[in-house]
Structures are given as structure tokens and as C-alpha cells.
Image (tube, rainbow, N blue to C red):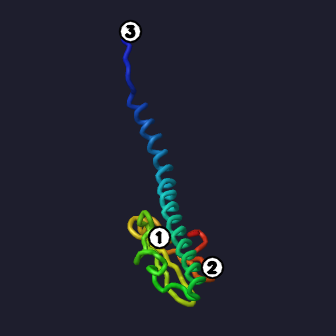
Amino acid sequence: MINQKGFTLIEVMITVVIVGILSAIAYPSYTSFVTKSGRSEGVAAVMRVSNLQEQYYMDNRSFAEDMTKLGLSEPFLTESGYYSVDSVGTTSYTITATAAGSQATRDTTCATITLTSVGIKGPSKECW
């Protein structure tokens, strides 16, 4: 009797199918996670600018009309560059974070994240 070692073609095909099924399940989950993590960077930046606007208002009795008065660059980009953040208004403000780069193509649902001086968050609850 000859003792042969190795895999049969059927065993290899079954393994390839199992890896394919696992990949089909894991990849969409991964991309969703990456999108949401990028979105959290945009939300954090909006909240940071909001806090700076409120501090500026306490000192000057008006909101800053440009980001440089808040000590930020114009335009203000988040740490990873996923969002560009801008704030407009002097008697009230609207802060808008606009998705940039790869985040803009990944996250079409929340391409912009907004917050007003009265606390209205946009565009949807899902983005926050």
C-alpha cells in the first residue's frame, strides 16, 4: 500500500468556498466600521469648533466670523484629513464639516455634518 500525502481537489475547493463566504461577510462590515470611525472624527471636530465659538462669544459678545479668530487654520482640516470644517455667522453660527478625500466617497449619507448655535444637528440622527 502506497501512503500518499496531500489534499484532494474537492478539499481545496471547499476551503476556497469557505474563505469566499467569510470574506463576503467580513468586508462590508469592515468598510462600515471604517466609514463610521471617519465620521466620528468629523463630529468631534464640529463639537470642538462649537466649544471654541462659545468661548469666543463669552469674551467678545459675538461669534467669530472666521476660523482664524478661534485659533484654527482656514480651512480647518481634521487630523486625518477626512473633513474640512467651517463656521459662519456672528449673531448665531452654523458649523459645517464636509467630507473630504476618501471619506467623501465612502460616506454619502453624511457627506456634511452640521451644528447650529441653538443645538440643531444635521443632516440626520444617524450622522451623530
Up/down of 21 relative to 59, above or below: above
Residue 123, can we see it?
Answer: no
Measuring 36% from the left and 11% from the top, which residue is drawn there?
A: 2
Q: Amino acid at mark 3?
A: Met
Q: Which residue is mark 3?
A: 1
Q: Tell which circle, 3 or 1, labels the residue nearer the N-terminal end.
A: 3
The mark lying in front, picked from 3 and 1, is 1
Neighbours of disc 1 within 10 Å: few (<14), some (14-19), many (20+): few
Q: Amino acid at mark 1?
A: Thr
The disc at residue 108 is: 1
The mark lying in front, picked from 2 and 1, is 2
Spatial separation of the CA atoms under disc 3 and disc 1: 64 Å
Neighbours of disc 2 within 10 Å: few (<14), some (14-19), many (20+): few
Q: Amino acid at mark 2?
A: Gly
Q: Which residue is mark 2?
A: 119
Q: Identify the secondary structure beneath mark 2.
A: loop
The mark lying in front, picked from 2 and 3, is 2
Q: Identify the secondary structure beneath mark 1.
A: loop
Up/down of 65 relative to 71, above or below: below
Spatial separation of the CA atoms under disc 2 and disc 1: 23 Å
Closer to us: 106 or 12: 106
Q: Quadrant of residue 128?
A: bottom right
Up/down of 5 relative to 101, above or below: above
Residue 47, can we see it?
Answer: yes
